[in-house]
Amino acid sequence: MPHCVECVTFHPAVFACGVPMSRAWVRLLITSVGVTLAVGSCSNEFDTERAAPARASLGAEIYRIFCKRIAASELPNDVSGQQTAALCAGLEPPEAAPTERLRAMAAERTRLVDALDRAFPEELTDDLDAFMVQLVPFYDPPTERLPQQTRALAELLAHVAEDDAALGALERFSTRLGYRPLRLALGVARPALAYPRITELTQTALTTLAEGGSANAEWENLLRTLALELATSEAAPPAPPTEESTLAISRRLLFTPDLAFGSGRSLFLTRRDRRGIVLPASTAGVPAPFVDMNGDGLADVDPLGRFVGAAGGL
């Protein structure tokens, strides 16, 4: 009597549900399955060890990641990234780049990788890795602290870029280079960074002032107060001629010579006028090649605070 094997799926072209088969075919099927299992059991054990791919230097890895990010924006249809994988790994020449930006980046790959490797030597890799791992929680939603800070900074810079007065002030700052000795150029930043317990101080301050810290509420109130003060601040009118301003008093105190202040060692300071511009050395008037075309008794300067001569430049 014929037999029916229910739902046999080993080879749909030969076996199917409801197809009559003889005892010989059933024996052949069972024998084939047994032989297959026996042969398979003789194979090597499954290797669970992960074969880590060969890694390039840290600079090369950073370059590869940035290259892939740029490629993703340049080639949005290349979802897998296979079109530029070899290029970003340095396995293809710049001529193989599909876009101008990628070609320019690939042309400078050697210099970029070398600069990154010098900036992050191997002995700092472990510390850098630990630092990057500690930064990961600052990217976690919903707060996304670091992305929010970068977006806020970008918004601030955009406002500054559209403010002619702010740009003019920054330009005037740049013309004051050299007014202070190089060792003092960083101001309070240099001694602050040289403080031996700066790391401990920073960690304590962040823990105390951050959300959930013991002084977070007071810190938020201080920031809110400063924001309101800056938003409503107005330029103070100049002091009357008969009343000395705080700046004038400070200038007179700091630049008044007196033997009582002497210590036997000369200390050179730069005298400045009321505009904050260096005063040219002179016993009377404005010496050449400086000029005073407007008769205010001070050497003329351009809108950026640079001295000008009779011909318009110095």
Image: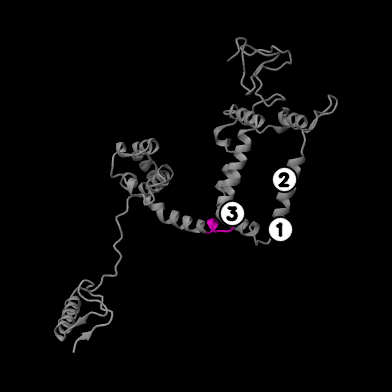
Residue 227, disc: 2
Q: For the residue carrying disc 2, how many other residues have a C-alpha within 10 Å: few (<14), some (14-19), or many (20+)?
A: few
Q: In the rendering, which numbered label is found on residue 175?
A: none
Q: Position of residue 22 (x, y in %)?
A: 16, 84
| Amino acid residing under circle 1 | Ala
Amino acid type, label 2: Ala
Secondary structure of the residue carrying numbered label 3: helix
Q: Which quarter of the rendered picture does the C terminus lie within?
A: top right
Of the numbered discs 2 and 1, the one sitting upstream in the chain is: 1
Which element is circle 2 on? helix
Q: Tell me the CA gap for discs 2 and 1.
A: 15 Å
The residue at which mark 1 appears reads as: 217
Part of the protein shown in magenta: 137-142
- Taking the view exactly as shown, the residue that stands out farthest to the right is 242
**Horizontal and vertical percent for residue 5?**
24, 83
Rendered image quadrant of residue 246: top right
Point out the frontmost of discs 1 and 3: 1
